[in-house]
Image: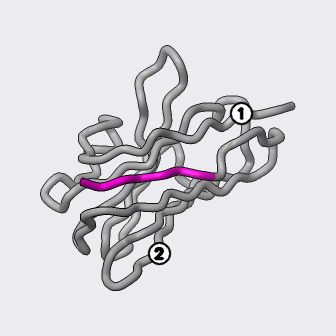
Amino acid sequence: AVQLVESGGGSVQAGGSLNLSCVASGRLYGTDCMGWFRQVPGKEREGIALIYADDRAFYRASMKGRFTISQDITMNQVTTVYLHINSLTSEDAATYYCARARSTRCSTDRITSGGGMDYWGKGALVTISS
């Protein structure tokens, strides 16, 4: 199994920036991919970005530019994934989840569908203050 723990959530002022982190542990494979998703109560979860083990990153079209996904690789395994968000607005208030998938399930379709990953963190709540 894989455990994912997000951190970095909290209250952020509109217009500011935020860095989220997600540490992975457990049975990790060097070919896994990781991604960030978010969900607002009452709405479906949406994908933000996906990053492959070779550092290729893909974003939801509407989120290109303000969101940046990156990762740390230790001993050929991705152990930490980050999400940087700038120019925050009230619409960015959500619970942010990181997720991990085995290579056979890695696909940019995960961004579109908002799901399909193998392992999920418990989420980090982000609120926006004006």
- Residue at 62% x, 58% y: name it: 84
Quadrant assignment for the N terminus: bottom left
Element type where label 2 sits in the image: strand
Q: Is residue 33 magenta?
A: no
Question: Seen from this angle, which residue lies furthest bottom?
Answer: 75
Disc 1 element: strand
| Residue drawn at the location 80% of the way across and 49% of the way down | 16
In the rendered image, residue 54, in percent from the top left (x then y), is placed at 32, 76
| Separation of residues labelled 1 and 2 (CA atoms) | 26 Å
- Quadrant of the rendered image containing residue 44: top left
Please indicate, yes or no, whether residue 55 appears anywhere in the rendered image. yes
| Magenta region | 1-7
Residue 63 image point, x, y percent: 53, 46
Q: Is residue 76 left or right of residue 74?
A: left
Structure colour scheme: one colour
Q: Residue at x 34, y 85 (%)?
A: 75
What is the crowding at mark 1: few (fewer than 14 residues within 10 Å), some, or many (at least 20)?
some
The residue that disc 2 covers is 72
Residue 58 appears at what percent x and percent y?
A: 39, 58
Q: Is residue 6 above or below residue 92?
A: below
Looking at the image, residue 105 sits to the left or right of residue 90; the answer is left
The amino acid pointed to by label 1 is Thr
| Amino acid bearing label 2 | Asp
- Name the foreground residue: 34 vs 80: 80
Is residue 23 left or right of 1 when viewed as pictured?
Answer: right
Q: Is residue 31 above or below residue 8?
A: below
Residue that badge 1 annotates: 127
The quadrant the C terminus occupies is top right
Upstream in sequence: badge 1 or badge 2:
2
Where's residue 67, x and y in %?
58, 54
